Image (tube, rainbow, N blue to C red):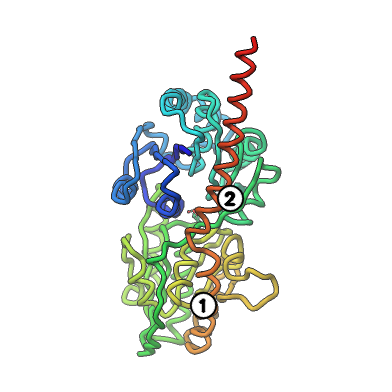
Amino acid sequence: MRVVILDHTGALGGAELALVRLLGALDPEIETRTILMSAGPLVDELRSHGHIVDVVPAGSWTGATRHELGGSRLSAAFSALAVLPYSFRLARTLRRMKPDLLCTASLKADLIGVVSARLAGVPLVWHVHDRIADDYLPKPLVGAVRRLARWIPAAVVANSLATAATLPGARNLAVVAPGFAPEQVRHGQREPGDDGHPVVGLIGRISPTKGQMEFVRAAAIVRQAHPGATFRIVGEVAFAEAEYEAAVRAKVEELGLTDAVRFTGRVDTPDAELDAMALCVHASPVPEPFGQVIVEAMIRRVPVIATRAGGATEILEPVTGEEPLGRLVEPGDHEDLARAIIDLLDDPVGAAARAERAWESATVRFPIERSARQVTAVWSSVARAGADRSARRFRWARRR
Ligand code: GLC
C-alpha cells in the first residue's frame, strides 16, 4: 500500500508528534511519503526516523489562523480561492505519484485534500485531531467542514470520541487514539521524594486553549498552603499566540510569582520534565480533542489533574461513574484547580497509588502499535475500495 500524507505545518504540534509516532509503528510494507506545506522541525524529525518528506511550500496562508481563514463567509471564500492553485499543483503531484490514498493530517490539509484528491482520482482519508466545534473553530468553518466530512473523504479517523462527536454523519468514521512509543514508558517505580519543594508542571503549546493563565492563578492559591511549591510551564508559543504568552507572564508578575513560576520554553523530550514533577496539570479551559500529554504523564507514573471535558475525560475516566485515573476539575475554574493541586500535594501516597492504576490502564490502552493497526485497517479498506472502483472503470472502458 502506498500512502501520501499531507500536513500544512512543519512545526511540531501535538498532531505532528502523533504522526511521527504513527509512521514509526507502521508495517514496513506500507510505503508512506509525507508532503508538508511549510518547512520546520518536523522535516528533520521525520527524516531522522527514515521517512520520506517533501516540502511543497504553499505561501503565507499556511500561517494564517483559523479565524483569519474562516472567520466569516467572505474570508472563507477568499481562503478557498487562495488555496485553489496549490490544490491543482498538489493534484498533479498526486497523479505522478499514484498513491493508493491521500491521508490528510490537519484541518488545512483536509480542505486542500478535498480538491486535490478528487482531481487526481485518489481516495481521501481525513485524520482529524481537532474538535470541529464552535468553541474551537469559527462557526462558518465548522459548518463547512462537517458538511464535507459527510460526503467527500472515503473515511474519517478521529483522535477521540469527543472529536468524533463533533462530526455527526461523517463517512466511515473511526476513532483511533494517538499512541505512545515504547521508549516513553517508565518501568521502574518513582522515588517518593517529598522534600517540601514539590514541582507542579503543565506541558503544552502556550495558548489560551491550554490554560496556562488558569494554571498561574491556581499557583498563587497553592503557594499559600505549600510555600515551597514551584510551577513549570513547559512549552512555547506557536501559531501566532504571542500576546497570550505576554499576558500570562504579566499575570505571574502581578501575582508576585516570579520566583515560583518558571517558563522552560520548548523541550525536546518532556520525559525529564515529567519525571521531576510531583504532579502534572492539564488545564485546558475548552474541551481538549484528545490530550496526549495526559497519557505521557500516566505512562511515567506521574499523578495527573485535568479538566473534565473532551478527550481528557475519556482518557482518565474510561468507564463513566468509576473512580477516575486522575483528578478531574471544572474547566476554566482556577479555584477548583488549586484545590485539586493542594489535595494531591497533601496526600502524596494516595496520589501515587492512583498514578499506578493510571499507568496500568494507559500502557494497555494507548500503545502506538495499537493505533497503527487501527489506522492500517482503515487505510486498507479504503485502498481496496479504491482499487475495486478503478478495476470496474477499466473493465467498463474496455467493453466500450
Ligand atoms: C491535537 C489536539 C490534541 C491531541 C493531538 C493528537 O494537537 O489538540 O488534543 O492530543 O492533536 O491527536
Residue 63 to residue 194: above or below: above
Residue 395 in the image, given as x and y percentages of width and height: 62, 19
Amino acid tagged 1: Ala
Q: Position of residue 115 (x, y in %)?
A: 53, 27
Q: Nearer the viewer, mark 1 or mark 2?
A: 2
- Return the x and y of residue 279 as percentages of the image width and height: 45, 77
* The residue positioned farthest toward the top in the image shown: 400
Q: Residue at x 53, y 48 (%)?
A: 376
Name the disc covering residue 256, or none.
Answer: none
Q: Is residue 82 visible?
A: no
**Which label is found at residue 158?**
2
Residue at the disc numbered 1 = 338
User: Circle 1 sits in a helix, a strand or a loop, which is it?
Assistant: helix
Residue beneath the point at 69% across and 70% down: 320
Q: Residue at x 46, y 51 (%)?
A: 15
Q: Is residue 347 visible?
A: yes
Quadrant occupied by the C terminus: top right
Q: Is residue 56 left or right of residue 150?
A: left
Corner quadrant of residue 89: top left
